[in-house]
Image (cartoon, helix red, strand yellow):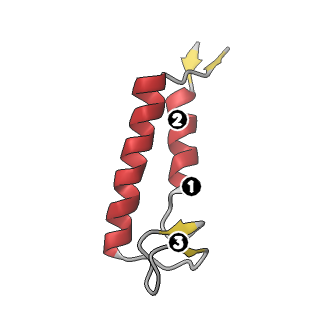
Amino acid sequence: MADWGPVVIAVVLFVLLSPGLLFQLPGRNRVVEFGNMHTSGLSILVHTIIFFGLITIFLIAIGVHIYTG
């Protein structure tokens, strides 16, 4: 049986936290901008830190597992 939990969580968080797709933190003109499809180095850094924190919580603290087979 394969554990697909880490893969699914990582892909979903990667898509949701892509800077500029749903939101960008910090934005160009405001603190948070929604759906602007632009990015900057600082927003990439902020989204990376958020991604690392959430994936750590979901995979290590909660222990999400999805088994197939």
Of callouts 3 and 2, which one flags the residue occurring earlier in the amino acid sequence?
2
Look at the picture and state if 53 lies above or below 21: above
Place of residue 20 in the rendered image (x, y in percent of width and height, measured from the top left): 52, 72
Image mark for residue 20: 3
Q: Quadrant of residue 9?
A: top right
Q: Amino acid at mark 2?
A: Val
Q: CA distance from mark 1 to mark 3?
A: 11 Å
Of callouts 1 and 2, which one flags the residue occurring earlier in the amino acid sequence?
2
Q: CA distance from mark 3 to mark 2?
A: 23 Å
Q: Which residue is mark 1?
A: 15
Look at the picture and state if 4 lies above or below 40: above
Q: Which residue is mark 2?
A: 7
Regarding mark 1 in the picture, which secondary structure is present there?
A: helix
Place of residue 10 in the rendered image (x, y in percent of width and height, measured from the top left): 50, 41
Total count of labels: 3
Residue 44 left/right relative to 5:
left
- Mark 1 residue crowding within 10 angstroms, few (<14) / some (14–19) / many (20+): few
Q: Quadrant of residue 39?
A: bottom left
- Mark 3 residue crowding within 10 angstroms, few (<14) / some (14–19) / many (20+): many
Place of residue 27 in the rendered image (x, y in percent of width and height, measured from the top left): 45, 78
Q: CA distance from mark 1 to mark 2?
A: 12 Å
- As drawn, which residue projects farthest toward the bottom? 29
**Residue at left 35%, top 62%?**
46
Q: 1 or 55, which is in the foreground?
A: 55
Q: Quadrant of the N terminus?
A: top right
Q: Amino acid at mark 3?
A: Gly
Q: Quadrant of residue 33?
A: bottom right
**Residue at left 40%, top 52%?**
50
